[in-house]
Image: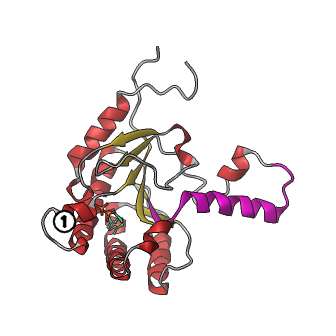
Amino acid sequence: MPETNNSLPMHIAVIMDGNGRWAAARSLPRSAGHREGAKAVRRTLEAARDMGIKYLTLYAFSTENWTRPQEEIHTLMQLLERTLDEYQKSAQKEDYRILISGERSRLPAGTLAKMDALVRSTAQNKGLTVNLALNYGARQEITRAVNQILKEGLAEVTPQDIARRLYQPEIPDPELIIRTSGEERLSNFLLWQAAYSEFYFTPVLWPDFNKEELQKAVDAYRARKRRFGGI
Ligand code: FPP
């Protein structure tokens, strides 16, 4: 049997779930849950960087989130823009490199401009790479890659051909995917990249997530046996 000697994951991906339930439990509006969620994002970036994690992908807004009430979408976009502004000020000092994965269509022009500026101004940073999945859907990502291949006229396709055309081809696949709030599904997140990922589900709601919870997830990952289809 292989030893349980996994090293630190290079890439962790997180489905940040439970903002609404966190707020409901306190009789607060859902927007309050999202605001606390944004604070948990900040804590998690710091914790991941301090632990030596190289890549952190966060599912911030899915292609399916557009079906939420207009008011909630507005709150999330506002919060996102505010967060982008804040990171524009602090990312250099914190040594974060920001990347964005997802479709640009439907995102407000102001949000797109802030995203682009932040990606550009942090491109040289060497610390934690933060990949924000924004208007992201894995089926859309794979379909987009296949459509590019069709346009290029390839006659036959290898897995590498697809992988090279995903949003962030240079980021290694996540070794660990965390989902908070007790839900245990992938919800159209990183379907291609998750082929060999370890999953960690916790009942903790996203606004309560912190350094200790991240450490628990990493410890659980390190105790797993990874076989990649071998024995
Ligand atoms: C899930 O909670 C969370 C989201 C819809 C997206 C995550 C958004 C944030 C953490 C806020 C800010 C993010 C950034 C990057 C600034 P939910 O509303 O689905 O919770 P529920 O399932 O309890 O209703």
How many labels were placed on the picture? 1
Q: Is mark 1 within 8 Å of ligand 1?
A: yes
Q: Position of residue 214 (x, y in %)?
A: 28, 45
Horizontal side, residue 93 vs residue 142: left or right: left
Q: Quadrant of ligand 1?
A: bottom left
Answer above or below: position of 90 versus 219.
Answer: below
Task: List the residue tagged with mark 1.
Answer: 24
Which of the 4 quarters of the picture holds residue 195?
Answer: top right
- Rendered image quadrant of residue 43: bottom left
With respect to residue 181, does 108 lie above or below? below
Q: Quick one: SS at disc 1? A: helix
**Residue 182 seen anywhere in this rendered image of the structure:** yes
Q: Going 31% across and 74% down the picture, which residue do you hit?
A: 86
Residue 88 x, y percent position in the rendering: 37, 74
Tell me which amino acid carries mark 1.
Answer: Ala
Crowding at mark 1 (Cα within 10 Å: few <14, some 14-19, many 20+): some
Q: Residue at x 80, y 66 (%)?
A: 151
Q: Residue at x 47, y 83 (%)?
A: 108
Q: Residue furthest top?
A: 1
Residue 84 picture location, percent across and down: 37, 74
Most foreground residue, 71 or 92: 71
- Magenta residues, as a range? 131-156
Toward which corner of the image does residue 149 lie, by quadrant? bottom right
Q: Quick one: quadrant of the C terminus?
A: top right
21 left or right of 190?
left
Residue 166 in view: no
On the image, the x and y values in percent for residue 133 come to 46, 63
Say if the magenta span includes residue 155: yes
| Along the line of sight, the residue nearer the viewer: 112 or 35 | 35
In magenta stretch: residue 63: no
Q: Residue furthest bottom?
A: 109
